[in-house]
Image (spheres, rainbow, N blue to C red):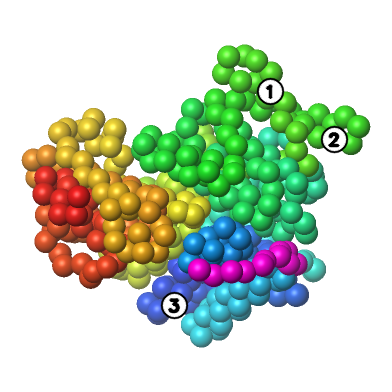
Amino acid sequence: MAEFDLLIIGAGPGGYVCAIRAAQLGLKVGIIEKRVGGGKPRLGGTCLNVGCIPSKALLDSSEHFHNAGHAFAEHGIQAAVSLDLAKMMARKDKVVQGLVDGVAFLMRKHKITVFSGTGTLLAAGTVSVTPPEGPSVEHTATSIVLAQGSVPIDLPFLAHNGTTVINSDQAIALSQVPKRLTVVGAGVIGLELGSVWTRLGAQVTVVEFLPQICPFLDPDISRDLQKILTKLGMTFHLETKVTGLTSTGGQNALSATAKDGSAVSIPGDVVLVAVGRRPLSDGLEKAGVALDERRRVVIDGQFRTNLPGVYAIGDLVPGPMLAHKAEDEGVAVAEILAGQAGMVDHNLIPNVIYTWPEVASVGLSEAAAKARGAVRIGRFSYGALARARAAGESDGVVKIIADAVTDRVLGCSIIGARASDLLAEVTAVMSFGGAAEDIARTCHAHPTFGEAVREAALDSLGRVLST
């Protein structure tokens, strides 16, 4: 008889949420985490320890610092500010530690057994745990969930060394503000961390191989974001291929090639490589787990791998590498194992860039929607929004895409203050197959940022009220 009903490898957002939901449903659950801090397993994975949470803490702190130096005067507030980076980093660490402790409390509350060490799938039903000290121990389970997550991608000609070349894990823990920071990759991670260090005083240059930043965004939203970040002080080199790093006389310079073939040299003290992440699927093939061409675990519609009783979720499997996607998949797997109808609508996974202003999107882009048939587009500018004007946040737009025949909402993109929060309304409407008319007929409090969503829906119907 197996020791556990469910054993989970990896205690990131997907793993620990899966464990909690399974325990709520009456399963005997164990979870394995290799990250250690203070002699204990540090639960929460990349998101909580070195990703989503610490980066957002720094984004908020750097926004406060920037506003104090650039926006307070407009509000009649006179302030002389200086940066205490060590204290800012200490606050970030305190936020992270509090949440890590919170996850540990939840494991105890739900009577989930936590193993400290590296979990290795040996075969269906069997996992070995190698602790930081001591021999490996084998454990058995009726079902196993693989939730090891992902790690930053290294470039062979720009391997990170923790000083002059860093990855995203290290970019949240710099001891001083670099005078010149070069960011390789204009995706979510590169732009978020680039904006943090720009606001704190670094000269930030972003180099991107593709013709637009954040290629998954609608081109017009991407252009708006680039304009705003350029105004903030960031410099962009698009359609530029990085080839290496040269050091002369103690000075570093990133070597690259522009679209026209000309050589580009970008001096900088620190290079942040932010070209994406790869699934941490190393070693799974040895156990017989099938991987695809991108080394993601192959799963079916119920998250089952090719091995009986072995499931996979989160960054290991196809789809966006997002914490909330992993969480929903973790819940779905737990419910499936308990005999319920767990499911995730992968067409409605929100995507957010936590720059300021934020960018948030869900569903189809304008181009993808038009490829399927006739659509109506509704737009509403923050510049015409009373609450945004009062707050001094007039940069932004809400864009809603609706089917021209059925009026069903197909997608939404928002750039502007509180975009991540505003998107939830649209996502909820879309999850029920709702129409732009549904949003337009819903009373929104005045004055709020949420009114921009309603006005965009009204615009798609040809009856916007506020412009």
In the image, the segment drawn in magenta is 76-86
Answer above or below: position of 444 versus 158. Answer: below
Label 3, label 1: how many angstroms apart (C-alpha)?
Answer: 55 Å
Which residue is the site of mark 3? 23
Of residue 408 and residue 248, the one placed in the foreground of this image is: 248
Label 1 sits on a secondary structure element that is strand
Which residue is the site of mark 1? 264
Residue at 35 percent of width and 68 percent of height: 335
In contact (CB < 8 Å): disc 3 and disc 2: no
Label 3, label 2: how many angstroms apart (C-alpha)?
Answer: 55 Å
Q: Does the magenta segment cover residue 36?
A: no
Of residue 328 and residue 361, the one placed in the foreground of this image is: 361
What type is the residue that disc 1 sits on?
Answer: Val
Label 2 sits on a secondary structure element that is strand
Of residue 467 and residue 364, the one placed in the foreground of this image is: 467
N-terminal of the pair, mark 3 or mark 2, is: 3
User: Could you say where residue 102 lies in the image, as x and y percent from the top left?
Assistant: 56, 79
What type is the residue that disc 2 sits on?
Answer: Gln
How would you classify the magenta stretch by its main secondary structure? loop
Answer above or below: position of 190 versus 158. Answer: below
Would you say residue 457 is visible in this rendering?
no
